Image (tube, coloured by chain):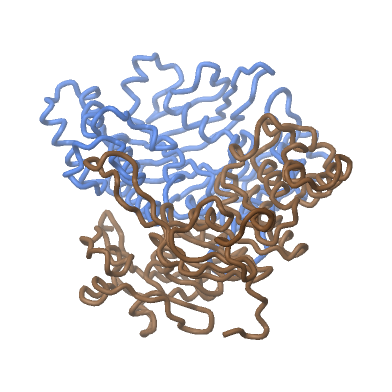
C-alpha cells in the first residue's frame, strides 16, 4: 500500500470574484522511500496541494472534492487536535523561503528541541537536546553552531536547520516546497544530495514541489506536471523526460536551457495561463497549445494512459 | 593585441577594485573591509552578449552597478569607447548614462506602481528632453512592440499591477532600450520568473542584440542560461576573475577548479551528453590562508598548500581568448575520477 494516496482532489479558494479552482481533480500516490516531483509554474496549485497535505490551507481555502489518505487513514475528516498530532510526526514540510521559517529571536537548537518536546512530552530537555545534536550531525551542521541565532547562519545553513527540524519527529513523508530556490548552485547541489541520502537512510517519502524542472529531474523518481490546477502529465522521471506526451510538458522542457548537448533554440510558451475563477470549459492549456483541435476548447480532455505509470491529460497527444 | 576579425572594444574595465565596510559595531563583526571586486580587468566588445557568472556575493552585481555608474570604483578605470568614466562631467556624463542602461532582477520592484506603462517607459525621454508628447508616445509604442507587448496600445495605459512578471520585465527592457543605448546591463533578468517567461526574455535580449547591435552584459548565476545566450563569459568568485573566455569553451572545457565545481553542481537534464564530474570542491572548507593566496584556496581540491596558500594566481591565457587564474590550469586536464564532494556518505 502506498504511504500517501490522493484521489480526485479538488481545492477551491473563496475570493471576491467567486470561487477560484486552484486544484482540480488531482490524483497521485507516494511510496515509502520514493519521491514525487510536483512541477509547474507559479499559480498552478502545487503549493496549495502541499498546504492541504499539511492541513494548513488558509481560511478561504477548502477541499471541495476527493480524498487524501495517509497510510490508509483518511486525512480530511480530522479534527484540529488530530491534525496537530499528525503534523510533523507523520508528515512534515520544508517551507518555501527557509530564511523566514525560523524564529529570529530564539536560538536554533531551542526551536528544534521545542518541536521534539511538543510531540514527545515524555522526553526530558536533555534528551531532546541530544537528539538535536544527532540531527545536526545528520544534516551536516557543525555542533558548535547549535546555540546560534538564525541570523548568524548562512542561507544554506538555515536550510539545513529547517531540514533537521522536518526530520526531528521521524516523519514518514516530507513535503519540500521549493527547498533550494534561494540558494546558490553549489549549496543547492549539496542540499539535494543530502536530501537524497537521508531519504534512502530513513525510507522517507518525499513530495518535491518546484518550478525548476532540472532540479526535479535530478532528485525525483516520479514526476507530475501541473498546469492551471490540473495534473496534465504523470510518469516516472524517465518517461516524462524521454517521452513527454502533453504539449505543455514538451513546451516546458523546450523552454529550459541545458548545460550540455546541442545548443538548440529555446521555445518560449506564448501567452499566459488562464484565470481560474468561474466555469472553465475544455482544455485549460488550449489557448497556448500548438496542436489543439477544434473540440479542445469545448470538451474537457480525457486522461490517456501510456503505461502503468505514464498518463497525460490531452486528446491530441500520441 | 588586436585581432582583425574581432569587433572593437566598447567598454573596458581596467584593474577595477571595490571595497565595502561592513555595518555594525566592531565586536559584532562590523567595520571590516569586504572586498567586493579585486583587480578586475575585462573588455566588452561591440554587439556581443557577455555573461558575468558567479554565486551570490561574488561581486557580479557590484560590477554591473559600477558599469552603469550606480557605484564608484575604489581602484581602477572604467572606459567607454576609450573615454574614462572618472573624467566625465556635465553633458558628457549624461551622455554616458544615456549610452549605458540597466535592467534589474525584480520586475515587481523596479517599476513605479503609480506610473502607467506609458509614463514609465517615456520617463527617460522626458528626463532627457527628447521629442514632444506625440513623438514620445509613438516611440513608446514602437518600443513596446519591439519587446513583444503587442498590440502596444493595450499595454501602454495599464499599470504595473495589471501585468504578469514576464510582462513587467519586458516593460523594464523597453524602458532601458528607449534611448537606444550602446550597452545594456541585465542583472539576473529572469531569476524571479517562471521558465516559460524566462525563455521569452532570453529571446527578446537576443533580438535586441541582433536588431540594434547593443552590447549586453548579462549577470547570472546560471551557467545554462549563460551558455544559451552569451558569446563570452567570465566566472567570478569572491570578487576575483577566475576564468574568462568563449562561452562554449569555458563550459565544455572548464579549466579553473571553481568553474568545474559550478558545473558539477548545476542540475543536468535532457540531452546533456555524457556527464563527467570534476569533483574539485573540498568540504568542509579548510582554514584560511591569510589574504595573500588564491581566493578559492579554502574550497579547492587541487590546491597546493605551499603555492596556492601564499601566492594568488594571475589571470593567464591558456588558448586564444581563454584566460584562467589558476597555478595548475595549464597542466594536463584534471582527472575525471577525482573524489567527488558528496555529503551524506553515499
In the current view of this chain or complex, which residue is farthest to the right? B134
- Give the side of residue A294 with respect to residue A76, left or right: right
| Residue at figure coordinates x 59%, y 37% from the top left | B109
Residue A203: x percent and y percent? 31, 44
Judging depth in this view, the residue of A124 and B206 nearest the camera is B206
Residue A99: x percent and y percent? 38, 37
- Give the side of residue B167 with respect to residue B31, left or right: right
| Residue at figure coordinates x 42%, y 48% from the top left | A183
| Residue at figure coordinates x 57%, y 22% from the top left | A65
- Give the side of residue A258 with respect to residue B180, left or right: left
Instruction: Count the labels in the image.
Output: 0
Picture quarter with the C terminus of chain B: bottom left
Query: Can you say whether A86 is above or below B264 in the image?
Result: above
| Chain in brown (letter) | B
| Chain in blue (letter) | A
Judging depth in this view, the residue of A76 and A305 nearest the camera is A76
Does residue A3 appear in the picture of this structure? no
Picture quarter with the N terminus of chain B: bottom right
Residue B285: x percent and y percent? 25, 59
Query: Can you say whether A241 is above or below A98 in the image?
Result: below
Does residue B113 appear in the picture of this structure? yes
- Give the side of residue A137 with respect to residue B49, left or right: left
Query: Can you say whether B77 is above or below A50 in the image?
Result: below
| Residue at figure coordinates x 23%, y 26% from the top left | A114
Judging depth in this view, the residue of B175 and B330 nearest the camera is B175
Residue B54: x percent and y percent? 46, 59
Amino acid at each position: 500500500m502506498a504511504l500517501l494516496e490522493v484521489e480526485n482532489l479538488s481545492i477551491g479558494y473563496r475570493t471576491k470574484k467567486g470561487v477560484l479552482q486552484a486544484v482540480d481533480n488531482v490524483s497521485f500516490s507516494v511510496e515509502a522511500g520514493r519521491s514525487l516531483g510536483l512541477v509547474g509554474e507559479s499559480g498552478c496549485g502545487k503549493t496549495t496541494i502541499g498546504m492541504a497535505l499539511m492541513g494548513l490551507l488558509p481560511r478561504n481555502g477548502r477541499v471541495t472534492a476527493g480524498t487524501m489518505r495517509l497510510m490508509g487513514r483518511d486525512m480530511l475528516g480530522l479534527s484540529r487536535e488530530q491534525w496537530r498530532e499528525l503534523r510533523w510526526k507523520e508528515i512534515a514540510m520544508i517551507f518555501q523561503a527557509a530564511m523566514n521559517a525560523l524564529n529570529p529571536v530564539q536560538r536554533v537548537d531551542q526551536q528544534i528541541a521545542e518541536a521534539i518536546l511538543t510531540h514527545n512530552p515524555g522526553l526530558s530537555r536533555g534528551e531532546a537536546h541530544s537528539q538535536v545534536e544527532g540531527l545536526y550531525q545528520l544534516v551536516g551542521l557543525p555542533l558548535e553552531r547549535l546555540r546560534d541565532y538564525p541570523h548568524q547562519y548562512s542561507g544554506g545553513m538555515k536550510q539545513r536547520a529547517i531540514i533537521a527540524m522536518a526530520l526531528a519527529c521521524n516523519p514518514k513523508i516530507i513535503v519540500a516546497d521549493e527547498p533550494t530556490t534561494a540558494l546558490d548552485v553549489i549549496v543547492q547541489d549539496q542540499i539535494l544530495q543530502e536530501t537524497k541520502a537521508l531519504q534512502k537512510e530513513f525510507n522517507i517519502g518525499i513530495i518535491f514541489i518546484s518550478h525548476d524542472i532540472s532540479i526535479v529531474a535530478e532528485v525525483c523518481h516520479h514526476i507530475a506536471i501541473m498546469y492551471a490546477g490540473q495534473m496534465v502529465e504523470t510518469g516516472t522521471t524517465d518517461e516524462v523526460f524521454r517521452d513527454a506526451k502533453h504539449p505543455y510538458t514538451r513546451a516546458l522542457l523546450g523552454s529550459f536551457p541545458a548545460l550540455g548537448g546541442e545548443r538548440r533554440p529555446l521555445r518560449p510558451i506564448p501567452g499566459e495561463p488562464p484565470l481560474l475563477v468561474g466555469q472553465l470549459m475544455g482544455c485549460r492549456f488550449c489557448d497556448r497549445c500548438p496542436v489543439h483541435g477544434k473540440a479542445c476548447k469545448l470538451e474537457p480532455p480525457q486522461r490517456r494512459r501510456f503505461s502503468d505509470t505514464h498518463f497525460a491529460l490531452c486528446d491530441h497527444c500520441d | 593585441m588586436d585581432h582583425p576579425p574581432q569587433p572593437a572594444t566598447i567598454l573596458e574595465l581596467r584593474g577595477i577594485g571595490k571595497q565595502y565596510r561592513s555595518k555594525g559595531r566592531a565586536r559584532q563583526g562590523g567595520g571590516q573591509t569586504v572586498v567586493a571586486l579585486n583587480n578586475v580587468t575585462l573588455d566588452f566588445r561591440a554587439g556581443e552578449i557577455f555573461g558575468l557568472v558567479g554565486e551570490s556575493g561574488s561581486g557580479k552585481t557590484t560590477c554591473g552597478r559600477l558599469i552603469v555608474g550606480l557605484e564608484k570604483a575604489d581602484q581602477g578605470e572604467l572606459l567607454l569607447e576609450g573615454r574614462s568614466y572618472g573624467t566625465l562631467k556635465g553633458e558628457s556624463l549624461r551622455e554616458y548614462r544615456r549610452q549605458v542602461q540597466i535592467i534589474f532582477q525584480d520586475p515587481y520592484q523596479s517599476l513605479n506602481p503609480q506610473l502607467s506603462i506609458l509614463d514609465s517607459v517615456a520617463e527617460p525621454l522626458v528626463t532627457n528632453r527628447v521629442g514632444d508628447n506625440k513623438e514620445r508616445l509613438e516611440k513608446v509604442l514602437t518600443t513596446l512592440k519591439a519587446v513583444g507587448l503587442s498590440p502596444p496600445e493595450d499595454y501602454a495605459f495599464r499599470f504595473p499591477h495589471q501585468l504578469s512578471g514576464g510582462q513587467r520585465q519586458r516593460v523594464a527592457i523597453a524602458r532601458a532600450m528607449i534611448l537606444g543605448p550602446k550597452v545594456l546591463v541585465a542583472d539576473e533578468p529572469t531569476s524571479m520568473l517562471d521558465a516559460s517567461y524566462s525563455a521569452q526574455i532570453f529571446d527578446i535580449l537576443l533580438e535586441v542584440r541582433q536588431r540594434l547591435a547593443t552590447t549586453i552584459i548579462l549577470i547570472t548565476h546560471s551557467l545554462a542560461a549563460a551558455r544559451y545566450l552569451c558569446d563570452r563569459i567570465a566566472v567570478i568568485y569572491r570578487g576575483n576573475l577566475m576564468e574568462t573566455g568563449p562561452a562554449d569553451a569555458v563550459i565544455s572545457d572548464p579549466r579553473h577548479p571553481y568553474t568545474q565545481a559550478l558545473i558539477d553542481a548545476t542540475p543536468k537534464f535532457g540531452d546533456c551528453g555524457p556527464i563527467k564530474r570534476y569533483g574539485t570542491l573540498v568540504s568542509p572548507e579548510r582554514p584560511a590562508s591569510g589574504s595573500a593566496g588564491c581566493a578559492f584556496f579554502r574550497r579547492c581540491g587541487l590546491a597546493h598548500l605551499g603555492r596556492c596558500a601564499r601566492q594568488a594566481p594571475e589571470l593567464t591565457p591558456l588558448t586564444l581568448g581563454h584566460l584562467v587564474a589558476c597555478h595548475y590550469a595549464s597542466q594536463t586536464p584534471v582527472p575525471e575520477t577525482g573524489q567527488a564532494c558528496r555529503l551524506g556518505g553515499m
